[in-house]
Image: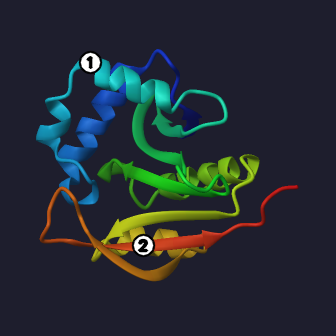
């Protein structure tokens, strides 16, 4: 398995893996498969651009035999430059419990350190025991904040955070 960043010319790959994730895990994301499928090509090109610019957001891809099998986003907080977010993490079911999720988390933590973030936050669907366990294993804690999953208002989401030692 190999972890790398999405490249500027890979909007089609971005779309393909995001749609796979939304189809397989509809209760893990804030948008629906139908919403994502309806987006024009320019939408995917703009998203790709937003996660491939230096010193900004990032998308990490996990690949096995040159096939994308997982991804995670490192996102910069809009209000506080010292805070980062993990968004849209997904691992193909065939590769779950094989270290892919942990490897993606490790890359996000390295990114956050390089970006001098002192805190990471994420939201996870309540009841997603495996994801919550992974996040707790790397040090995330439940903040007590709750919300509603935008793509399915019958589901609750949990905010988790991790304090980091910001680089000097």
In this rendering, is residue 62 above or below 100? above
Q: Tag 1, which secondary structure?
A: helix
Q: Which residue lies furthest to the top in this view?
A: 9
Q: In terms of sequence position, does the residue under pointer 2 or pointer 1 come before the other?
A: 1
| Residue shown at the point (45%, 75%) measured from the top left | 133
In this rendering, is residue 16 above or below 133? above
Towards the viewer: 34 or 13: 34
Q: x%, y% of residue 57? A: 55, 39
| Residue shown at the point (28%, 54%) measured from the top left | 29
Q: How many marks?
A: 2
In this rendering, is residue 60 above or below 88? above
**Spatial distance from mark 2 to mark 1, Cα to Cα?**
31 Å
Q: x%, y% of residue 35? A: 15, 39
- Image quadrant where one finds the N terminus: top right
Mark identifier at residue 85 = none
Mark identifier at residue 41 = 1
Towards the viewer: 78 or 31: 78
| Residue shown at the point (43%, 61%) measured from the top left | 97
Question: Which residue lies under the disc numbered 2?
Answer: 159
Q: Tag 2, which secondary structure?
A: strand
Badge 2: few (under 14), some or many (20 or more) residues near its Cα, within 10 Å?
some
Q: Residue furthest right?
A: 168
Q: x%, y% of residue 108? A: 60, 51
Q: x%, y% of residue 155? A: 18, 71
- Image quadrant where one finds the C terminus: bottom right
**Is disc 2 in contact with disc 1, using a CB cutoff of under 8 Å?**
no
How did the renderer colour the structure?
rainbow
| Residue shown at the point (33%, 47%) measured from the top left | 92
């Amino acid at each position: 398995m190999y972890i790398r960043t999405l490249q500027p010319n890979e909007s089609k790959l971005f779309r393909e893996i995001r749609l796979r994730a939304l189809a397989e895990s509809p209760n893990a994301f804030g948008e629906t498969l139908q919403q994502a499928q309806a987006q024009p090509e320019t939408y995917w090109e703009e998203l790709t651009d937003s996660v491939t610019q230096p010193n900004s957001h990032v998308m990490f891809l996990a690949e096995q035999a040159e096939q994308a099998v997982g991804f995670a986003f490192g996102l910069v907080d809009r209000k506080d430059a010292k805070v980062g977010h993990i968004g849209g993490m997904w691992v193909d079911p065939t590769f779950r419990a094989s270290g892919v999720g942990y490897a993606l988390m490790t890359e996000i933590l390295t990114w956050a350190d390089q970006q001098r973030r002192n805190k990471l936050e994420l939201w996870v669907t309540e009841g997603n025991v495996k994801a919550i366990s992974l996040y707790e294993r790397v040090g995330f804690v439940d903040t007590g904040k709750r919300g509603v999953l935008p793509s399915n208002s019958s589901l609750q989401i949990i905010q988790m955070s991790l304090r980091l030692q910001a680089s000097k």
